[in-house]
Image (spheres, helix red, strand yellow):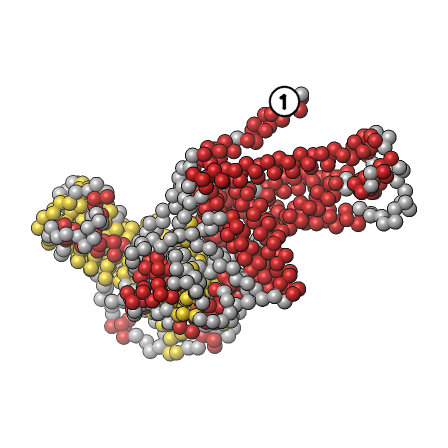
Amino acid sequence: MTTFNVMVPVAGVLSLPFLPLLHELIRRSDVAALPIGDGPFVDQALLAARWHDALRMHADDAPPADPSAAPPWHALGLLVRHDEEIRVLRHEHCDDVLYADRAITLDGGARAAYAFAEQRIDIHAGATIGMLAHASHIDVESAVLRGVVVGGTMYLHGAGGFVCLYGEPIVFGKAPELPAADTAGTPRRAVSLTRHFAKLPYRYVHGRYLLPCDVRLPAHTVVQGNLVVDGTLVLGDGCVLRGSVKAHRVELERHAFLHGAVFARDDVLLASGSCIDGVVSAGGLLRLTGGRIGAPGHPVSACARDVSVIGHACVHGDLVACRSGWFHASR
Amino acid sequence: MKNRRSVSLCIEGILLLIVLACSLAVRDTATRPAAAAVRVGMSAADAAGHSVRDAAPLAVRESTDANALLQTARADDAPITFDPDTLLMPGVAYLWLFTLLTCVYAARHYVFSLDRLFKPQHAPYQTITHGEWPRLTVFVAAHNEEAVVVDCLMALLATTYPRDRLTIIPVNDRSTDNTRALIDEVQALAPDLVKPFHRESGKPGKAAALKDALRFIRGDIMVVFDADYLPRPGLLKELVAPFFDPEVGAVMGRVVPQNADSNLLARLLDLERAGGYQVNQQARNNLNLVPQYGGTVGGIRKSALDAVGGWCDDTLAEDTDMTYRLLLSDWRTVYLNHAECYEEVPERWAVRARQLTRWAKGHNQTLLRYLGPVLRNPLLSRRCRLDGALLLGVFLMPALLAIAWATAITLYLLNGVNSTALGLLVSLFALFGFSTFGNFGVFFEIVVAARLDGRATRLRLVPVNVVGFCVTIAAVVSALWGLALDVALRRELKWDKTERFRRQLKPGR
């Protein structure tokens, strides 16, 4: 009897997990396949262009190409405010979709969730874009952009913040006028990486140099090869590297050039006049102080946990700050 | 649908009855030595205190000759004597070793789950949407896939990858159904993009077909899909983005069952896949261990493939084989949890068992080839070596578990429990035996995956996963037996195609 008295509650407790199971077997719930949708990987420029096309058709009262597909703002329950020019006044908040045939102006402290203009959008100090903006030309003056801003050309002045920008190009501040001595450039000499790494514990495996130490490429040289560095990689003044790199930290000194992609587990730092014309991904900080990323006609993605732009910088493509993005552009 | 559900319920009921019957039988066996001791005039306490050396032969003789029960045991009476000591020590050693292995695997599962729950997740390739996209060749492996191949190809035609840099090659491997005609129909829609390769003869198997198709590759990057997969428009860019990284040799995306609503098995596999990809693969990627290239929804760099010797067509798990060859050649494989793609999972247990058998056979072939090289490679980090070795053993553990059960039960019946070492072990083994039977570590992974996916109600089915583990054990034992026979008889490996259940999504097209 004692055994029975002990076993019954034990069996009762052990059977508890099977009660929801029985319920599920008798009456099924949540059986649909896991929805995967478009995933988090969204081409923001493409998305903004699609919104813009849909707005154009909406403004022209043209029938959509796919009648079954509802315009994107319908799903969000938003209305479209269409005009020749739209001005969002100081401290006004507008949650509708703004669509202007010419220009949209956001005065100081104004907030627009969605803004699309055929020609230009001017965002004045203290104004912000909440979700998505798209125009051929976007001018930002000391604003914190909380949404995605996509423009043909985009100019940012003063100090502010951003999350995701796309432009061909995105220009921060004005380019400084360099002294003649800087721009003339010292002649560069070609260097063999195998010879340069002779004193380092490197391995050359299938077209890549694997280095378990910090590496500095000498100034005013041209080198070629893909580098995987378990440490800091520094490209000296005026050094040109043709190849992609992966390192813990990557530093480009003045006028250094990197023709390839850069992947850093930590920071990527670009000094004045330096340039990367491939994809950039940094697990830490991406700091641009006068550097350039991408090339005209060849947009690339530059993403980092934190992005900091000081002075002048130029990016062709998208610039994504996963945690925080700040700029303090020169006037 | 209703019939299917009732059949599933019946199967569940029968399995529960079997488990109950087994436990009753074991209980009866366990009480027998005490009863026997009473019958031969010994007290139960004496019997319990009897040394292992004396008690075990008695138990053996009891089971073989009923008349001997009432006679005094003498060593010279029986012409053939069985000394359990010879079995005891190796058995105990094996059980300790297995328990240790189980602890290591359980710890591994918990580490992965905790990593996914609490550590910051890194996705350095997720935001790459623009760049100089390389030339890409997509191979679609198809062998008698008339039910699904068109959907896969149409989904690929809707991709956002730059068209001028894309080539789609459906690899029609000796199909005997309408696959060829269907592929040709799709090719007519996009002749510049789709370049079919109709393979008429040659060695059977996906690896052999891909090896032959490799000569048509354009560019340095290739992505492979099975014909039952439905890639969404942005998937190709997602899979190619990591190849900008010079360290990456292969990429693997996440597989999501599309037919999860069809029956109980599909739902269980949905849970299992979620645990395997959302938690296990992603955590291995986060911890810089060994994410596995899965052979489909994945890409490979051609130069890396060439560097490691191309596709290996003498194995049933060319994907695992490739993972280890890349690992040993300093190429990194990355897993992308955001690169999701629908697949079709088996809807019948027999099909699932065959699939598991094939995987187990291939995986264990890889184990035999690469366990030594991985453990000896000084260029790999220690934790990478450990994880590589543990990953190689995942299809061996169920067989080792089956042996452990047999050993434990044998020792138990021989009254070996009376030894202190084994007595302690049995308690521990009982705990871990059950936990491995339904491996709590794996369960925990599944629970974490369901939470991360936001589908908690699916967890009601978790206890039924025990059935899935039983099938895995049976399939792995069968696979190992088959592998041993293949080696002994020098038989050629047989590729077993997984049966498809989906019909074409839009028959009109």
B431 vs A242: above or below? above
Q: Is residue B483 left or right of residue B322?
A: right
Picture coordinates of residue B25, whole percent (x, y): 68, 36
| Residue neighbourhood size for the residue with mark 1, other residues' Cα within 10 Å, grouped as few (<14), some (14–19), many (≥20) | few
Chain letter of disc 1 in the image? A
In this rendered view, identify the residue nearer to me: B411 or B305: B411
Q: Residue furthest left?
A: A84
The residue depicted at 56 percent of the width and 47 percent of the height is: B471
Residue pointed to by mark 1: A5
Is residue B500 at least partly visible in the picture? yes
Report x, y in % for residue A70. 21, 47
Residue at 86 percent of width and 39 percent of height: B68
Look at label 1 and name its amino acid. Asn
Q: Residue furthest top?
A: A1
Q: Nearer the viewer, residue B220 or A313?
A: B220
Quarter assignment of residue A9? top right
Residue A40 in the image: above or below residue B331: above
Would you identify the image quadrant in which residue A11 lies? top right
Element under disc 1: helix
Residue A6, relative to residue A42: is it above or below?
above
Q: Residue at x 9, y 48 (%)?
A: A83
- Side of A51 relative to B221 (left or right): left
